[in-house]
Amino acid sequence: MCRLTPVVVYIMMWKALAGPAPMGVINKHILGPLGIGAGEYLLNANPWLFVILVNGFIGASFGMIIFSSAIEAIPKDYMIASKVDGASTWQTIRYITIPMIRWPLLFVTTYQTLSLLTSFEQIMLLTDGGPGLYKTEVWSLTAYHRAFTSYFGNTQWGYGSAWAVILVI
């Protein structure tokens, strides 16, 4: 669902979910009954947790497709042999499943990390690199801000282009 939904619609949905207490679903219906104080998640001192949560849900569909096919590719004989040997479910996961999917796990982890470094539209729509002095700014957003934002009356196109070249390399 997350990969099929346009990013703008998805981000607007998350902004509505995490909005202030009267309108935000998270503050009003989840945290309110638990007695946890309502918060402004996008404007607090550390909005990275919220940005990572939103990007995690966007990337979860990709990871689930890779992991489900990798787990299906594990020979059933290994699972049966672990049950015959008396392994618990956690031991089967630890000693058979995770070692057998180590390369897809490494691929998805690397891909999601690099995707977070290059995610422009999610962070631009959620926080615009803020709050404060660009606390959630990543390389792609830095290149954009340097090239198209006016610092003391001049835009720094060359500096922004250099950031973009570093990002591509």
Image (spheres, rainbow, N blue to C red):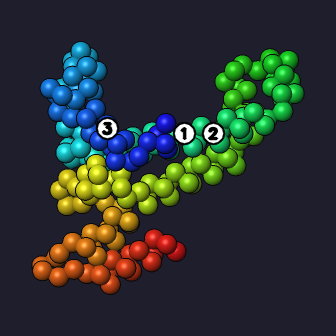
What residue is pinned by disc 3?
14
Type of the residue with mark 1: Ser
Q: Mark 2 points at which residue?
A: 65
Q: Mark 3: which amino acid? A: Trp
In the foreground, 113 or 146: 146
Which of the pair 80/144 is nearer the observer? Answer: 144
Looking at the image, residue 7 lies above or below residue 159: above
Q: Where is residue 124 in the image (x, y as percent from the top left)?
A: 30, 56
Q: Residues within 10 Å of mark 2 (few under 14, many from 20)?
A: few
x, y (%) of residue 63? 58, 42
Q: Which residue lies furthest to the bottom in this view?
A: 158
| Cβ atoms under marks 2 and 1 closer than 8 Å | yes
Q: Is mark 3 on a helix, strand or loop?
A: helix
Report the residue at 49% width, 72% height from top: 168
Task: Give residue 39's position: percent from left, percent from top.
Answer: 19, 33
As measured in the structure, the alpha-carbon distance from the residue carrying label 3 to the one carrying label 2 is: 23 Å
- Considering every residue shown, the one lying at the far left of the view is 152
